[in-house]
């Protein structure tokens, strides 16, 4: 019978190799003993220490003491160890392999993880690596052609998404801060209490903040000094708190939360009132009455509204008598008025006496309608801390919703139809407009063009809902009718996650953020309804017509339309933060530098696509197309550097003394550039490659390949030679991508071999022909392997139908191939080599990217 214990999973888990291989040598014996496993190392150390105990010792204690003193007095500061060279000897390859095998089995010594010292040095190593000498000893030490900030940027912004160690360390400190600000005593770590005492003892305002008033510097308006005496993790925690603006804020906080905040040095109160909190009455409230929170102060001040209370020191009401007898307070009335005065200085949003409207009674949801339900209010202080508020803007201390004014009987609830009109979606020329329709003849019917931040259909629908909220009375029920079900899903399902994450990673966040603030400010229910029936559909059609007219008009969009009001949620909820989310927020806040070469090449791509497809793509689409899955890793890197203008050709060398000659093409005697190499150079190879590509394209389509240009080369990953839908990729477009990318990369390799390896000698036309045929045949073999792959991941497979569609009418003797030629050998492209009109055996082929 099998038994499962709590250790079974851990014991069965395959251990990953570590970055350090541990080995122990004992060199004072012949031959030297070596151990790489934990148990063997322990045995070796035990034998060594046992041998020390077996050494003969002196019987005479006086002589033994004299010998010890003599040895200690004659011992040099740095003793020479004869076996030092043996101990410092590098590991053999066999030792390294054995250590890795031991790590996989979980028997190797050492600890998991990377030491902090290594992380601290990685950034310096990386920075130094950018300025390291080139492999060519004759070349000068070059600088990195692409700056570090660009390499760290996201893929969609032209970067490589490399690890930003500084941002990673800040994200770790944010997680520490998250643990520290977990104020629930049952869930709070023990070290947090010690940190509270350390910070209280290092208060910058120790002269004005009395002992006993320190609760938490993130809830009060005092702060701890920047001291190097703190532990490293506390220093890092305070640094990120200031750097990314940690604050306590929430819309319309519940009374329970307002009562839990500190009364003394409340950070929502004006700092100029701090000195009033050290009066004798305030000291008495802290010492005698035990008042620390707003709620406790409100209980002390509650007696002032009691009919039995008299505003005299000798008041005999029950509360005053108890304070004089039990708390030894000489003037309870004055203490109560002082507590009330401190509370009155709080903004209305944080005053416990402010009464917010109760939650709205949402109508029951149906299959076609559902009411807007705001995210639930926070239930603990820990949930109220927000971070990245410096990135988002200043705080707002006014309540979102106040009690509604008296009802106006002649104004009924509003039913507003929403409509949108968008053109050129997904491109740089995207234009959107929104329209709202009340009823025929209503002057509030309108349509407006939208700013560039509304670049898709959902953003336009949200913008229409925002217009409706601003046009309708906030104290009357509002029904928003649209043809889309995405609007209620966004505002009822995703809003809580978006606000908790600080809108990190949300595309076009401005429209939903502005709409969320507008919906929260309403004091009457808001219902989302999907248009059903002729009447509702006609209203949405009329609103869409108004949006279309607005788009065709000469009216410019209002750039401030989606500017979030001050009452909008700022930053991200700290308690919902993860290290990955914090890292992404930090990275998103850092600007990506603009490179002249990159801007010029991206403009070439846009201009070509505008002429070829009718509209220009967005930057994100351009950078993603460079990493198309149809490209090999080498070609992806090559195209990425080409768009950035990062290849070391032409002008790169003209600024390096002694190497100016490398800027000139040795064959054409003109300044070298990518355009010259790909399209203009008369060196043997370029024309042959493009003619072969055109011939193969002619086999496929019956027409020649369009004349290449820099724009067509850099945009080959997104060019469509025929219309394509996402669910059915086009084989013709795929062949174009493969043909252009493989051809231009071969031209680049041939140029490098000629200039660097062969001292300017160009290859023969036959060699270029055969190299191109080999490259295309190798690519065909890769496609066949991917189509027949049994891998579970779809990313590592290519649909067999797509591979057949790609290479159809381009294969040699295609009419003689079997129907399942994907699994057959000897399938070649329709252009043979010049040597024997047939390819050599597969074993003799050259690597694809040699």
Image: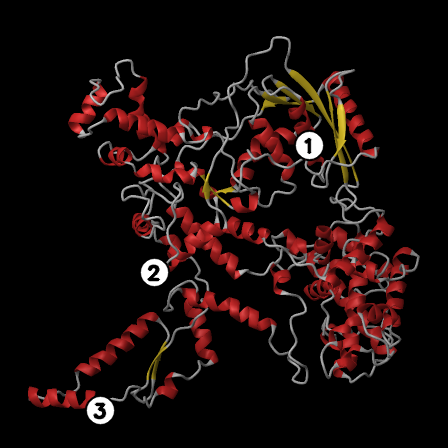
Q: Answer above or below: position of 718 versus 183.
A: below
State the residue in front, 843 or 611. 611
Q: Quadrant of residue 833?
A: bottom right
Instruction: Classify 10 Å Cα crowding around label 1: few (below 14), some (14-19), many (20 and above).
Output: many
Q: Quadrant of residue 563?
A: top right
For marks 2 and 1, the one nearer the N-term is 2
The residue at the point 45 percent across, 31 percent down is 347
Q: Is residue 586 left or right of residue 681?
A: left
**Residue bearing mark 2:** 229
Q: Which numbered dot is residue 463?
A: 1
Q: Determine if residue 413 is in view.
A: yes
Pinpoint residue 317: horizontal percent, then vertical percent: 22, 17
Residue contact at pointers 1 and 3, CB within 8 angstroms: no
Instruction: Classify 10 Å Cα crowding around label 2: few (below 14), some (14-19), many (20 and above).
Output: few
**Residue bearing mark 3:** 74
**Distance between the alpha carbons at the discs numbered 1 and 3:** 86 Å
Q: Quadrant of residue 90?
A: bottom left
Q: Is residue 9 left or right of residue 296?
A: right
Q: Secondary structure at mark 3?
A: helix
State the residue in front, 812 or 201. 201
State the residue in front, 31 or 487. 487
Pinpoint residue 737: horizontal percent, then vertical percent: 79, 58
For marks 1 and 3, the one nearer the N-term is 3
Residue contact at pointers 2 and 1, CB within 8 angstroms: no
Q: Secondary structure at mark 1?
A: helix
Pinpoint residue 629: horizontal percent, then vertical percent: 70, 56
**Distance between the alpha carbons at the discs numbered 2 and 1:** 52 Å
Q: Nearer the viewer, mark 2 or mark 3?
A: 2
Q: Quarter of the image containing the C terminus? A: bottom right
For marks 2 and 3, the one nearer the N-term is 3
């Amino acid at each position: 019978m099998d038994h499962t214990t709590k250790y079974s999973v851990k014991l069965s888990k395959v251990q990953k190799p570590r970055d350090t291989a541990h080995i122990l040598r004992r060199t004072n014996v012949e031959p030297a003993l070596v151990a790489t496993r934990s148990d063997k190392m322990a045995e070796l150390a035990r034998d060594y220490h046992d041998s020390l105990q077996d050494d003969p010792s002196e019987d005479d204690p006086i002589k033994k003491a004299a010998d010890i003193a003599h040895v200690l007095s004659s011992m040099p500061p740095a003793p020479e160890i004869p076996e030092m060279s043996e101990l410092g000897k590098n590991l053999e390859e066999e030792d390294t392999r054995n250590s890795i095998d031991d790590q996989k089995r979980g028997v190797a010594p050492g600890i998991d993880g990377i030491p902090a010292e290594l992380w601290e040095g990685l950034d310096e190593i990386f920075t130094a690596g950018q300025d390291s000498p080139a492999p060519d000893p004759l070349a000068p030490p070059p600088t990195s052609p692409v700056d570090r900030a660009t390499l760290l940027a996201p893929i969609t912004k032209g970067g490589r998404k490399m690890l930003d160690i500084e941002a990673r360390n800040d994200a770790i400190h944010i997680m520490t801060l998250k643990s520290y600000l977990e104020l629930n005593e049952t869930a709070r770590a023990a070290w947090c209490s010690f940190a509270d005492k350390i910070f209280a003892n290092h208060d910058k305002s120790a002269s004005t903040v009395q002992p006993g008033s320190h609760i938490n510097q993130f809830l009060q308006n005092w702060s701890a000094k920047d001291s190097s005496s703190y532990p490293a993790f506390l220093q890092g925690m305070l640094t990120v708190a200031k750097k990314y603006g940690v604050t306590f804020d929430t819309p319309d906080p519940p009374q329970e939360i307002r009562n839990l905040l500190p009364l003394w040095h409340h950070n929502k109160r004006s700092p100029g009132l701090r000195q009033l909190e050290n009066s004798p009455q305030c000291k008495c409230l802290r010492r005698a009455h035990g008042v620390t929170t707003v709620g406790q102060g409100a209980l002390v001040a509650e007696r002032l509204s009691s009919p039995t209370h008299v505003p005299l020191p000798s008041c005999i009401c029950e509360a005053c008598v108890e304070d004089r007898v039990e708390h030894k307070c000489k003037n309870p009335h004055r203490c109560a008025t002082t507590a009330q005065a401190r509370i009155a200085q709080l903004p209305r949003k944080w005053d416990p006496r402010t009464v917010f409207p109760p939650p709205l009674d949402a109508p029951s949801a149906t299959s076609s309608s559902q009411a807007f339900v705001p995210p639930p209010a926070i239930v603990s202080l820990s949930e109220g801390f927000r971070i990245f508020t410096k990135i988002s803007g200043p705080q707002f201390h006014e309540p979102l919703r106040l009690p509604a004014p008296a009802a106006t009987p002649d104004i009924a609830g509003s039913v507003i139809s929403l409509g949108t009109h968008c053109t050129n979606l997904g491109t740089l020329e995207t234009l959107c407009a929104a329209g709202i329709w009340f009823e025929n003849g209503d002057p509030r019917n309108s349509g407006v063009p939208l700013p560039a931040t509304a670049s898709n259909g959902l953003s336009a629908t949200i913008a229409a809902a925002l217009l409706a909220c601003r046009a309708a009375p906030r104290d009357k029920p509002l029904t928003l009718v649209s043809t889309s079900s995405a609007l209620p899903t966004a505002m009822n399902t995703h809003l809580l996650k978006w606000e908790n994450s600080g809108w990190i990673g949300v595309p076009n966040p401005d429209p939903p953020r502005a709409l969320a603030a507008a919906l929260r400010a309403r004091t009457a229910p808001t219902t989302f309804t999907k248009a059903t029936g002729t009447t509702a559909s006609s209203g949405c059609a009329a609103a869409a017509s108004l949006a279309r007219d607005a788009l065709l008009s000469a009216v410019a969009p209002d750039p401030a339309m989606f500017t979030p009001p001050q009452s909008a949620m700022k930053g991200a909820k700290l308690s919902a933060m993860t290290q990955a989310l914090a890292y992404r927020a930090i990275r998103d806040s850092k600007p990506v530098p603009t490179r002249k070469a990159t801007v010029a090449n991206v403009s070439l791509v846009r201009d070509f696509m505008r002429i070829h497809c009718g509209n220009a793509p967005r930057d994100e689409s351009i950078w993603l197309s460079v990493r198309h899955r149809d490209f090999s890793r080498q070609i992806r890197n090559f195209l990425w550097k080409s768009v950035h203008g990062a290849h070391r050709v032409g002008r790169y060398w003209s600024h390096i003394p002694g190497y100016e000659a490398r800027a000139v093409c040795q064959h054409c005697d003109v300044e070298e550039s990518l355009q010259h190499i790909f399209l203009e150079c008369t060196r043997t190879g370029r024309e042959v490659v493009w003619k072969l590509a055109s011939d193969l394209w002619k086999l496929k389509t019956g027409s020649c390949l369009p004349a290449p240009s820099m724009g067509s080369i850099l945009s080959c990953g997104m060019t469509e030679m025929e219309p394509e839908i996402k669910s059915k990729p086009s084989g013709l477009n795929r062949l174009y991508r493969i043909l252009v990318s493989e051809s231009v990369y071969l031209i680049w390799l041939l140029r490098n071999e000629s200039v660097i390896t062969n001292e300017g000698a160009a290859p023969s036309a036959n060699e270029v022909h055969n190299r191109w045929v080999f490259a295309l045949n190798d690519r065909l073999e890769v496609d066949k392997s991917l189509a027949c792959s049994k891998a579970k991941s779809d990313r590592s497979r290519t649909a067999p139908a797509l591979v057949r569609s790609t290479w159809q009418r381009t294969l040699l003797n295609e009419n003689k191939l079997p129907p399942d030629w994907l699994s057959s050998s000897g399938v070649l492209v329709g252009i043979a080599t010049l040597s024997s009109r047939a390819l050599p055996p597969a074993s003799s082929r050259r690597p694809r990217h040699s």
